[in-house]
Image (cartoon, rainbow, N blue to C red):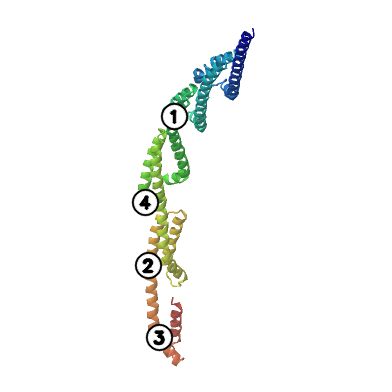
Amino acid sequence: DYVTALASLHTAVTELEALEAEIMRVQQAKADYDTALASLQPRLIEASTSEYQTLTELQAPLIPLQDAMEAAALLHDYETAMLKLRELETAVDAFLTARETLDAARLAYEAKLGTLAGRLAAASVSEMGSTSELQQNIITAEDAMTAAAQAELFDDALTLAGDVETALVAYEAVIEDRDLYQARLAAMSEDLMEASVSQAKWTYLEPIQSAMATLQTEMETAATAEDFATALVKISALETKLAEFFAAIEAKRVQYEAERSPLEPRLTHLNACNYPLAAQKTAVTTAFTDVDATVTEEDWDGALNGVASAEAALDNFDTAHDAHDATLRSQITAELPALRTAANDPGNGELSSAATLRQNIAALD
């Protein structure tokens, strides 16, 4: 029955063509699946591990989706396998994106923490009672920051690191004030000790010394209470007073030299004078000896007073000198006629008067 046979053949051919088409479709689906799986595989491996507990929820769907995908592929249901692969790909991308975001936040937090580590270590040492509250503020802020980091809330931890730094700055400001106070105190201590001594030669400086003593007491009281901000204010005022103290001494020295200098030529003249003015010369010499003794002691106020006395002694000497000089000149004037007579008539007996005149002339200063 060729007609029937031919019909059966046509049916068989049609079924074979359909089977071939189905095989090609399945092969193409498998090829598409294999390509997509190969592209996803590196990311899938990367997403298979995580150090973050907060990503557990995002990571949880990955294994069930992968199992469903592979099960469909084993049954050659590549369309279903491809659908599961796309779901898996979306889940993998969401997980990796979240992990990258968390990594970036963690690195930023750790970088900030690295800048604080040394300061935190330094602040952990208890140096002063007054800083205990400030140190507790640091501990509280650090605990909150650490708790946020342990909870993998790195953005929050980074924000809280700013609170830690603020607390550190407050603490470090006190330590910085203390160190600055101690350094400035050490720098001025030698001068302060010298200026604090009460000496007779510094009577005129007593008001400054009194003010300095008050400031020093206030400064030390503040430092003892660990109020170094106030101590620094007081030490600044004390430094000003100390500079005023030594400036006053220097001003006295300069004044002494200015008043002593004009007397030197007069003293030189006195030393060269041969007039019989021993008492006046002794008074001047004694006065200048006393001046030089006060200068040796750097008693410039005493030296100024001594210069005044020395000048008065010089004035007395000059008065006596001028009086003696006037007497000699008067005698010379009175004896000039005798000198002329002796010169004209050597035998007239006036030679002795002439000799006296010559002596008086020679004695003139």
Vertical comparison of 169 with 151: above or below? below
Which type of secondary structure does the marked residue at label 2 adopt? helix
Q: Amino acid at mark 3?
A: Leu
Looking at the image, is mark 3 or mark 2 earlier in the sequence?
2
Amino acid type for the residue under numbered disc 2 = Asp
Q: Nearer the viewer, mark 4 or mark 1?
A: 1
x, y percent for residue 203 = 37, 50
Q: Determine crowd level at label 4: few under 14, some 14-19, many 20+ residues with C-alpha closer than 10 A.
A: few
Q: Left or right of 44: which side holds 234?
A: left
Name the residue tied to disc 3: 336
**Of the pair 300 and 39, the residue shown nearer to us:** 39
Q: CA distance from mark 4 to mark 1?
A: 62 Å
> Percent from the top left, x then y, of residue 29?
58, 20
Q: Quadrant of residue 348?
A: bottom left
Reading the image, the residue beneath label 1 is 159
Residue 185: quarter of image: top left
Q: Which residue in the structure is indicated by mark 2?
A: 315
Residue on which the image places disc 4: 204
Q: Which of the two labelled residues, at mark 4 and mark 3, occupies the earlier sequence position?
A: 4
Question: What distance separates the C-alpha of mark 4 from that of mark 2?
Answer: 28 Å
